[in-house]
Image: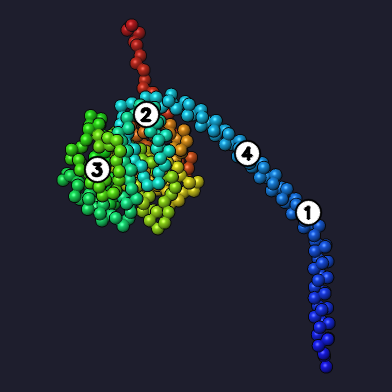
Amino acid sequence: MIDFRYHLVSIVAIFLALAVGIVLGTTLLEEPAVRSAQEMTAQLTKTKEELRVEIDTLQGRQAGNDAFIDSATPELVAGDLTGQRVLLIETPGSSTAVRESAEKVLDQAGAEISGRVTLTEKFLDPKGVGVLDGLVNQLKPVNMIFPPTGTSWGRASTLLASALVTTDPAQAGTPNAAAGDVLSTFEAGGLLSVEGDADERATLAVMLAPERPYEGEGAEVQAAALVAVADGFDAAGRGTVLAGIVPPVAMPGDVISALRDEGEVSKRVSTVDIVDMPLGRVVMVYSLREQLSGRAGQYGVGPGASAPMPPPATPSPSPTTSDSGS
């Protein structure tokens, strides 16, 4: 009969064998494993240092380019928008710093900024379309006709644009008497805020996109709503540019990507996706100039951009003197 001492000796022998195996295994593998880990760590450290040097170099080059473009901007845009009034449209999540920089460059281009309209989150709330539709039906002139397939935001933008922009240079700087109560009613309803003389109509509009794509289940609807707003202002004025920053990969809630994906709208409304950079603000001015000639384009370096900037403006042919004239 096997007694308790036998069991105890057996158990001790098993654990002893395991211990010896572990010691032998780690002793044999320790040196190669440690050496391999050290070599890998050294390689990763070297790669990290090389990448850091490369990043620092690229950032230095970009800073130099930005400084050059910034100093040259007054000359690059001089006179491009002389005689034009520009309305700024801020969207929920857009950057105040970007807007202030855009204002500066528009001024350098000779434009007069008519004012600023800031859309609120309530304006974009999908749950509030009933209120939006009610206000539009209440305020719209009798002769204003909306497309049968238009969205609530499309109809609202058509109404708002009639009070804020015009295609007729002779009407620029004057209010639209037929849309006199539109801004005040929308502002009282918490749908937007107004600064400056925005009711004295502009000829062009710059909409500033949110800094980051909208998120959540309503993100695509909100982005589509702003696309409809940009399209509405483009139709009522002499042109609209949607300016902002796009993520490296197109996302559902990104407004610029959403507009570029709308085939018909992208034929009319221009976008610029590098407006946070001095070059992007120059491109914004060039895009507005292109809009005045009836053309549009998608500019920048992000997904969906067709070129970094519009093609150079074709200079008007200078008059020639005939041989017989002097």
For badge 4, the amino acid type reads Glu
Q: Amino acid at mark 2?
A: Asp
Residue that numbered label 4 is attached to: 54
Reading the chain from its start, which is encountered first: label 4 or label 3? 4
Q: Residue at x 27, y 35 (%)?
A: 197
* Mark pair 4, 1: CA separation: 29 Å
Q: Amino acid at mark 1?
A: Arg
Query: Could you say which disc has been placed on residue 35 in the image?
Result: 1
Element marked by disc 3: helix
Of the numbered discs 4 and 2, the one sitting upstream in the chain is: 4
> Marks 3 and 2: CB-CB under 8 Å?
no
- The residue at which mark 2 appears reads as 107
**Lateral position of residue 104 relative to residue 12, left or right:** left
| Residue 288 quadrant | top left
Seen at 29% across and 48% down, the residue is 191
Residue 48 is at least partly visible in this image: yes
Badge number at residue 183: 3
Kindly report which numbered mark, 3 or 1, lies closer to the viewer in this rendering.
3
**CA–CA distance in space, label 3 to label 2:** 25 Å
**Cα gap from disc 1 to disc 2, whole angstroms:** 64 Å
Q: Residue at x 61, y 35 (%)?
A: 57
Task: Classify residue 194 as left or right of residue 101.
Answer: left
Q: Nearer the viewer, residue 240 or 268?
A: 240
